[in-house]
Amino acid sequence: FLDLENEYPSSYTPLPDHVVQQQETDQKKSHTPKKGILLTVSFFLFVALVLIVIGPDQRSAGPIVIEEDLLSNSSSSEKLRPYTPRGVSEGVSEKSFRPLFSDAKSFPWSNTMLSWQRTGYHFQPEQNWINGPLFYKGWYHLFYQYNPDSAVWGNITWAHAVSKDLMNWFHLPWAMVPDHWYDINGVWTGSATFLPDGSIVMIYTGSTNESVQVQNVAFPANLSDPLLLNWVKYSGNPVLVPPPGIGIKDFRDPTTALYVGGNKWRIVIGSKVSTTGIALVYETADFLDYKLLDGVLHQVPTTGMWECVDLYPVSTTAKNGLDTSVSGPEVKHVLKASLDDNKKDFYALGTYDVASNTWTPDDPELDVGIGIRYDYGKYYASKTFYDQNKQRRILWSWIGETDSENADILKDWSGLMGIPRVVTFDTETKTNLLQWPVEEVESLRQSSKKFDRVELEAGSIVPLDVGTATQLDITADIEIDGQALERTIEADVLYNCSTSNGAAGRGALGPFGLLVFADESRSEQTAIYFYIAKGTDGHFKTFFCTDESRSSKASDVGKQVYGSIVPVLDGEKYTLRILVDHSITEAFAQGGRTCITSRIYPTEAIYGAARLFLFNNATQANVTVTSLKIWQMSSASFQHYPL
């Protein structure tokens, strides 16, 4: 099965003729030098106000009227200029944040500000840049793309960390480095598959010495080692090259293998044909020889290159997760793709037919790339794995920066991993998934404060006395005045989070929610909120949004308004949970039907100056926060394993 004695081939294995020919064609099309350039990525209003502070035993406080411009974004309009994003010339999605504003000046970040940005309980490397989790012999393993040389994308190596609880981590030596012709330009995304005999096979994308994307195989050198410290690359790599008709830089990110019976396994690889995103399926019996199946698993026009494709089952009746190979009448198959064109992760529910090797969406209007997203903020290149330890499916994602590369180089790190999320089928709506932070994050909860029935009149804001507000876990249940809902004839039927005026845009029935990472005067603040629209037919549509427009006084960071529709069923309260951890927030509405992750870079609302507020900027409706609980969160442990 594996020739360990010849693990490193001594001679160059030539690529097939069709790959070489396409490579020569691509080289003729472009003569641009592939040099990385250092980029500076660029992207308020003070109102004096007497604040009434609520302590943990107080039921409510008198409302403070919000002036029309209190929550407004005073940032001036900025002109864009084109730039060359890092990573694109190498054949992957861009890794440097855009846009770059021509008139924006690099903010004078202090060491104090930059040090505050390092998170307390989100996994991140000690330094530099990051991007096939699995559970094995008592340890959760995280293999992630890492640049050991710099805090920018490049020289991609597989770093390795292990944890017993998904929160506290040990750094291990690198698992794989780019040291062969077939991966010398980067060891990119891969996936692990457990075989029936207990062995593990890792399939990963390598970028060759001529920047051709190929698929390679590696195996643990010692299966008795629970840390899986050493990996052996197969001597016959690459096992797959781009097939005819597929671009040499459009063939990457193999999935965990799906067992279909008859000693046959299938893997899915993302690609495109022109502007149509596609998923290719290969079949194998030994993970060394593969057959490309006819047709495609699925395709969606105008969605562009599909990266980090994922295909996995979810139970429609049970809350437990399913192994990747499970199928049956009470199972839906999720197909997910990271869209290279817009850097967003879309998923859809559907049915996988093994015989025809096709996946069909339940609702064509909610197909991959045009329907539902895992997360409506900064959340990309996600990957799920089946946790056989607790019978759950866990979703993990890379959270990139939205500051400048100059700032990343100054602080000497870039990027982090989102909190792992449990993924289940929403048995109430039957049209979407639910995502919720793994239960282990609750082990970091410390002291808490609870507020009951806080009344928020239309146009009011209330500060919350919670102490330090930089590492929190917040849960809230909110009710809106029923009479206001009934008497409102029509409200904001064309509302959209991203094109709205954010939290400053006052409507009859919203926005209302919380302000995090706010300083005392709220010259900096990040709003996380609900907004309700009502049609003339009496139907309501609820939006869940995050407004970063006043999140920082720095001019060279991203400040966007994120969000989308969130289903709220009859009789349900408006519920949300927010994980606050220095420069990141992860927000979950209605049990995780809609999620938003944001990177925040305050200059004032840091350390002890960070505050928390409730607000209701609606014009015609009062809201009541029936229950609000806020936990202080301890930092997780990140250490080197004592080998």
Image (cartoon, rainbow, N blue to C red):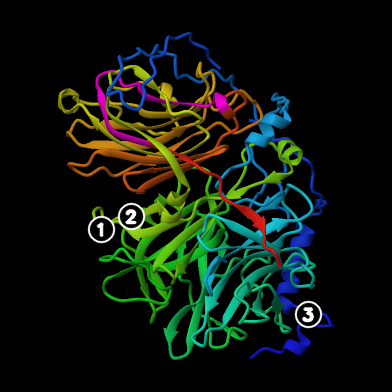
Q: Is residue 234 left or right of residue 203?
A: right
| Residue 578 locus on image (x, y percent) | 42, 40
* Picture layout, residue 11 above or below residue 526: below
| Residue 172 locus on image (x, y percent) | 68, 64
* Disc nearest the viewer among 2 and 1: 1
**Is residue 628 one of those drawn in magenta?**
yes
| Residue 105 locus on image (x, y percent) | 72, 25
User: Which residue occupies the foreground of this view, 526 or 539?
Assistant: 526
* Disc nearest the viewer among 3 and 2: 2
**What secondary structure is found at the residue carrying circle 3?**
loop
| Residue 122 visible in this rendered orientation of the protein | yes
Rendered residue at 23%/36% (across/down): 540
| Residue 29 locus on image (x, y percent) | 76, 57
The magenta segment is 608-629
N-terminal-most mark, 3 or 2: 3
- The type of residue carrying mark 2 is Asn
User: Which residue occupies the foreground of this view, 601 or 53?
Assistant: 53
Q: Residues within 10 Å of mark 1 (few under 14, many from 20)?
A: some
**What secondary structure is found at the residue carrying circle 1?**
loop
Q: Residues within 10 Å of mark 2 (few under 14, many from 20)?
A: many
Residue that mark 2 sits on: 432
**Is residue 494 one of those drawn in magenta?**
no
| Residue 606 visible in this rendered orientation of the protein | no
Q: Are marks 2 and 1 in contact (CB under 8 Å)?
A: no
Residue that mark 3 sits on: 14
- The type of residue carrying mark 1 is Thr
* Picture layout, residue 56 above or below residue 341: above
Residue that mark 1 sits on: 427
Q: How far is disc 2 from disc 1 in space, using C-alphas?
A: 9 Å
Q: Are marks 1 and 3 in contact (CB under 8 Å)?
A: no
